[in-house]
Amino acid sequence: MSFASYYPSSAYVINRLLPFKVVGASDIFIKSVHLKSGDSCQIFIDPYHEKDFHIYCLKPSLVTAEIMVSDKANNNYTLSLGYINIFEESLPGQSVAPTFKTNEAEK
Amino acid sequence: VKSLRVFFLFSLIVFAFQNCGTFEAANQFQYYSYKSSPLFYFDFKLVEKSMDDLGRQKFVFDVVISYALDLNQSASYSVNFSTKMIPGVCSAATGSAISNSKHFRTECLIPTPDDLYVQLMLSGPNGESLTQSYRF
């Protein structure tokens, strides 16, 4: 299990809702999300899409987060999301790598 | 009287906690603009509004679009610009949003300072469509 971003990393700017998806397994849903860093940011599960979550930042930030995922057999997984660089402004096609890595740990 | 006081205090505590929960829930979604299950995730942002030496007004927009039902499939877009007097005042920006082309900039230069009306039209791979209007 991992994450995928709906938007390219060049679109990671402040005051923009950034959607992400948990991928790599079927019949799963996000149980909870928790920000580990990024003081001016908020993270929340999409109210309509159970595998999607969003990050929104008011200031440039380096975001890390923990995503709790469950499957239908009630197995729980904790995924770590880090580091997402949120910029003041970024041009399309601008290289901002590395911004995105995931680690997985079964709980 | 004592039991009335206890009841009053208990009610006050319950009321306070209920409001706190409501505030947190509302606060969490204050940046979520989709009113129903989104077919497309998108953001349309004015990043520059300036005037040149000839008195023309320039608008630059930063746009990001993704098909929300499958992030690997493309969404087609068309951005149309008008003023009250001039429909199609600038050439429409059209394309397909997939991979890195999901994020792009588009601009419009209008002859005199005026309000700019923008229509963002999106269509998905299975015939879904959405039109969003803005005024700048």
Image (spheres, coloured by chain):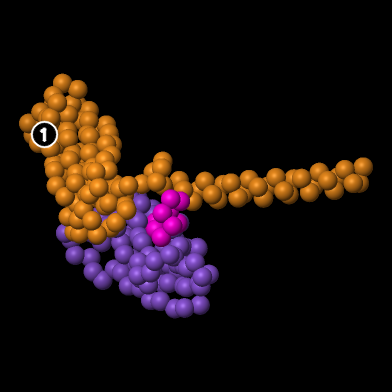
Chain colours: A purple, B orange
Along the viewing direction, whichever of A105 and A17 lies nearer the viewer: A105
Q: Which residue is drawn at 11% across and 34% down?
A: B90
- The amino acid pointed to by label 1 is Cys
**Is residue A101 at least partly visible in the picture?**
yes
Which region shows up in magenta? A45-55
Quarter of the rendering containing residue A12: bottom left
Give the image location of residue A9, x and y in percent: 25, 61
- Residue sitting farthest toward the right: B1
Question: Which residue is at a point 63% across and 45% down the rendered structure image?
Answer: B19
Residue B121 shown left or right of residue A24 in the figure = left
Q: Farthest residue in the top direction?
A: B85
Q: Which of A20 and B76 is in front in this view?
A: B76
The N terminus of chain A: image quadrant: bottom left
Q: How crowded is mark 1: few (under 14 residues within 10 Å), some or many (20 or more)?
A: some
Q: Give the camera-side residue of B116 and B49.
A: B116
Using residue B18 as the reference point, say whether residue B121 is left or right of it: left
Q: Is residue B74 above or below residue A98?
A: above
